[in-house]
Amino acid sequence: MNSDLKFDNTEIAFSQKSSSELRKAYLMFKMMSNPRWVSLGSNLALFGLKTRLPLIPQIIKSTVFRQFCGGVNRSDCSDLVSDLNQNGVKAILDYSVEGQESEVQYDKKTASIIDSLQTVNGNDGEAFGVFKPTAIGAYSVFENALNTDANQDTKEAFERIRKRYVSIFNEAARLKVRILIDAEETWMQDSADLLALEMMERFNTNDLIVYNTFQMYRHDRLEVLSSWISTGRNKGFKVGAKLVRGAYMEKERERALKLGYNSPICKDKQATDNNFDNAIHLVFENIDHCGLVIGSHNEASTLLTSTLMKEKGIEPGDPRISFAQLFGMSDQITYNLAAHSYNAIKLIPYGPIRDVLPYLIRRAEENTSVAGQTGRELTLITKELKRRKILN
Ligand SMILES: Cc1cc2nc3c(=O)[nH]c(=O)nc-3n(C[C@H](O)[C@H](O)[C@H](O)COP(=O)(O)OP(=O)(O)OC[C@H]3O[C@@H](n4cnc5c(N)ncnc54)[C@H](O)[C@@H]3O)c2cc1C
């Protein structure tokens, strides 16, 4: 690879962490490497919050919440955002509340997303706005809206979701704030994609405002991305692409097996990796018509992107290309990218502990694989603790 980047500098990676914070992170990832602890902890947390056991919120707050969330509200995150900014890292603040299901709540959520765009616009430390489709519309509506037999209620509810999208992107376009739209399960994604494409056609003609998420563990996504880019070229709009591998693999495979259709997921990890890297190549071939966010903790894909930037003579800080990692994970990538002047971003979830619990449980479950993320985090933290002579 023809890149100057290296991710083994743990001194840069953890420059923001005190030794006591690192020790706590070490113990937490160690516990998360044990699936039994994760399962027990998740059940206990759900039970404790439901029955209002007094100690449980405190325990969650000082462990996983502290590691993976910025706080309960936006203002809790402000010191963190400015610390990151001083180190060349921008933030995306994500109100990660899941499972709130009423039209009133969807409207409230839409209003709070629109409000937050003002803050993103006024704060040099924030790079993008973000939202999850099912935060502003019922899951069942996304799931059924494109069915030929969708009933009138569903059609009307989908129309209300469309209006919420338009009001969010109208304000984003006015303020020139870029927004990432998250991707979810395949069985609701087609209608979310339809809206995302409509928004791109409407708002991405001059600036790049709308970024949709492409989950490259899906074997059909390369073709979809390619067709969106062709449509964009023909109709005169740009395509904002946030590339991720995808977070719902087990759920997708189980449902496909249960209902007897072909799994939408690539056959193995290597196939997902190839698909992801092919998508990076595709975007670079069309970089004059695209914006790219690499949402990944994968070092090889990050290196590939920086190599292609170098080969094409694209400056590290070029606004068309950004790299994002989740808060609490892969600091070696974020901080080493920032040290080389790339657009490095941390996605910081926030919200009341009770409401961000599903997000926290997903992170803990994702981290149980020792061969995967936890192994990487533990190796790096251990290396840094040894460098600081805290571990032998
Ligand atoms: C900033 C950011 C935003 C994100 N937003 C979203 C989002 O909107 N929607 C979403 O779904 N996810 C999202 N994710 C999560 C993401 O999809 C991945 O789950 C996570 O980042 C791990 O993938 P990786 O590229 O970091 O690392 P890696 O460790 O290299 O890859 C792990 C991933 O590879 C895939 N994989 C693993 N084993 C197999 C297998 N046997 N067969 C096929 N594929 C396999 C899975 O997708 C798994 O998550 C986001 C991640 C980041 C960092």
Image (cartoon, rainbow, N blue to C red):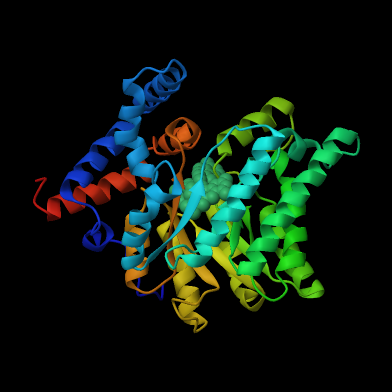
User: Of residues 231 and 122, which is closer to you in this image?
Assistant: 122
Q: How many marks?
A: 0
Residue 103: where, in percent of width, then height? Answer: 71, 36
**Residue at x 71% of width, y 53% of height:** 165
Residue located 28% across and 36% down the image? 28
Q: Is residue 213 above or below residue 65?
A: below
Which image quadrant is residue 86 in? bottom left
Left of 158 or right of it: where is 106?
left
Most foreground residue, 148 or 2: 148
Foreground pick, 190 / 167: 167
Q: Between 178 and 105, which is closer to the camera in this rendering?
A: 105
* Outermost residue, bottom side: 313
On the image, the x and y values in percent for residue 109 come to: 61, 44
Residue drawn at x 22%, y 45% is 21
Residue at the limit of the structure toward the top, as seen here:
51
Please state if 269 lies on the left or on the right of 232 as rendered: left
> Which residue appears at 33% of the width and 41% of the height?
66
Q: Position of residue 276 (x, y in %)?
A: 56, 58
Above-or-below relation of 270 to 3: above
Q: Is residue 9 visible?
A: yes
Q: Which part of the image, by quadrant, shows the N terminus?
A: bottom left
Q: Position of residue 50 (x, y in %)?
A: 47, 18
From where the camera sits, is residue 264 visible?
no
Classify 240 as above or below 352.
below
